[in-house]
Structure formats: structure tokens, C-alpha cells
Amino acid sequence: MGSRSKPRVLYVDDEQNNLNSFKANFRREYKVFTAISAKEGIEVMASEPIEIVVADQRMPEMTGVEFFESIVDEYPDCIRILLTGYADIEAVINAINKGQIYKFISKPWNEDTLRVAINNAKDIYDARRELKEKNESLQKAYDELDRFVYSVSHDLRAPLVSIQGVIYLANQEVKDEKALEYFKMTKEMVDKLDEFIHNIIDYYKSTHSGNMLEEINFDKMLKDIAGEYRYHPAMENLELNYNVDNKVPFSSNEVKVRIILNNLISNAIKYRKEHDNVHNVDVKVVTDDSGARIEVKDSGVGIAEENQQKVFQMFYRDSKSNSGSGLGLYLVKEAVKRLEGRISVESVKNEGTTMIVELPVNEDVDR
């Protein structure tokens, strides 16, 4: 931070002697402005960037509290100090409760007491201004992130789709085995990048989807997800089954629930054994008065016991041979956390894995 600037202080009092005394005592330390009435004080506020206002309570036409009431909306950042006698204590208490004044000082004021109050007020003013600037900077960064995600989801994915199309056409026409192997390797890398972009977009959607609640149609959601994988190469020798027992309607954040189901199913499909063997993925959803329970069970490679909690870490991959991004289960855990639910894993190495998500009934699930 730079050097501390002189506090810009306005003193409002209907006694000229008090104004003169204030200016004489503090003009070297502060940039002092004075006004002999509340009306004149309002005029000064309109023309100067005042940081701290000191006002006498007992003034004709408008009291100090009434003066503060008149400026609090237009100049909310300004720190307000009231000078008053103890007879005015009720008005002071009301002003403090309404947040209109920072401090009150009894009259006749003591120079040292008033100096400490003004210096503390300046510290508060500077701290609030710094916080405001940081919030504005964060908002700017947030807006830039919005634009970046938009760019990722549109501008970056468009050429990837084109590359995937070219690879598909090349596979239809090229007969050279070596060239086909290269095309296969290229497609795997493009698919991995496309998945990574999808995961970034999912994370963005999960953290920006608001707190809208709607009834979840699990049957339709699972049918849609299964449809997305219908022609995926990983579906060869794979059986994807789902069963929904919708005992009672369940409402939640649809974006987050879809992210949970999509990534759990994607992982169950991905972490399979050899393609020669039939791979089973079974999804079961049960809703009741306590919420929803989601189970995704597969007959894949399984997860070693010592790694079962690590799979929820960002970029962690249990299988080095797997082409996943390492973001899927991290996204699931974040979405579950925001829905105030729980996720657990049951797995035996080389036998399969079951992911269990429990989502509570909650009328206010988003932060």
C-alpha cells in the first residue's frame, strides 16, 4: 500500500468559535472543511470527496442525527462522528442502531479524544475502500472467467469437432494399416481433450447454476445419458442398465444432479477390463422421504483400498493406462457437496466398483 493520505474531514457546527477551534487544532494533520449549518454541510459534501464528517447534534433547522440521515444514502462510505451532550443520548442510541454514526463524543470535545476518533475513522474508511477495490477486482476476474468459459465451450470445441469429422472420413477411405493406427492415436488424444473441455464446462455450470430447484425426472435424465453413449466405441461388449424407484418426487438442482450421474456413468464405462469381456454397468436410483440414493455399479478394474479416497482428488487417475482427464469424480464430489449430500465408494480390485451418492431433501441446496 502507498503512503497514507491526509483524512478529508468536514466539521459541521452552528457556532463559529467551534469551527475556528477545530480548524486551528487539526489543519496541519487533516484536510479540513467546515460548515456553519447542515444545509451548508450538504453543499460541501456535494462538491468535495469527504471521508469523515463530524457534526454537532444541537443545531437549528436540522439536528446532527437528521443531517446524517439526509446524507447516509448518497454518501454511504463516509464515516460519521456525532458531537453531543448526554441529554441527547436517546437520539444518539437511535442513530447508532440505524448505522448512521460510527462514534459519538461528548461536548465540549477533547482534542486528543477527537483526534483518536478521526484517525480510527480514517483507518476504517481506507480498509473499506481497499475491500471495495478488491471486490471490484474479483468481479472483473469473474467476468473474464465467464468470457473464457464461453470461448472454451464454443470457439475451442468447434475445431475439435471438425478434427473428429476429418478422422472419421479418413478412417473410411485410408487402407494403410500404419496410417490407420496414427489416426486412432490422434482420435484418442482429441477425445481426451474434448472430455477435458467438457469437464471444465461442467465445473463452471456446477458452480454457477444458481439455487433453482425443480423436480428431477430420473428416468428421462438416465435415458438421455444412455443415448449419448449409444454409439460410443466404449459401448462395445457393454451392457448399461438403469432402474428408477421413484417412491416420492425429488426436487434438486438439475444441473448438478446431471453432472453427478453423467460423470459416474462415464467413469463406470471407462474403467473396464479387456474389451473382449462383457462389461456391466448398473444404475439404481431410489427416492423416498429422506431424499435420493444413487448407486452406479460396474464390473470393471476396481480400485485398490488405499486409493479409494484419492479418486475424488482433482486430476487423480487410478489407472495409468486410462485416458480420462482425472476431473470426473472431483466434479461429482464438488456437486454432491454443494447439494449437502454424501458420496462413498465400495470396490474390490479387479472385480468392480460401486459409487453411492445420497442426496437429502433440501429446500436451499446452493451457496
Image: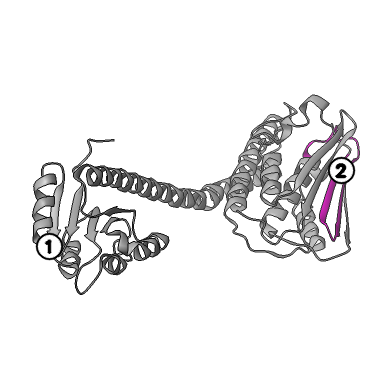
| Rendered image coloring scheme | one colour
Compared across the picture, whether 257 is left or right of 167 comes to right
User: From what the image shows, is residue 83 above or below residue 302?
Assistant: below
* Residue 90 within the segment the image draws in magenta: no
Q: Write down the residue under mark 2.
A: 297
Whether residue 191 is visible to the viewer of this picture, yes or no, is yes
Circle 1 sits on which residue?
15
* Amino acid beneath label 2: Lys
Q: Residues within 10 Å of mark 2 (few under 14, many from 20)?
A: many
Q: Position of residue 160 (x, y in %)?
A: 58, 45
Camera-near label (1 vs 2) is: 1
Extreme-bottom residue of the structure: 61
Q: What residue is shown at x 59% (from left), y 59% (from top)?
A: 210
Q: Are marks 1 and 2 in contact (CB under 8 Å)?
A: no
Q: Main secondary structure of the magenta part?
A: strand
Q: In the displayed orientation, state which residue is furthest to the front.
A: 87
The quadrant holding residue 96 is: bottom left
Q: Amino acid at mark 1?
A: Glu
**Residues in magenta?**
270-298
- Which of 14 and 219 lies nearest the eye of the viewer? 14
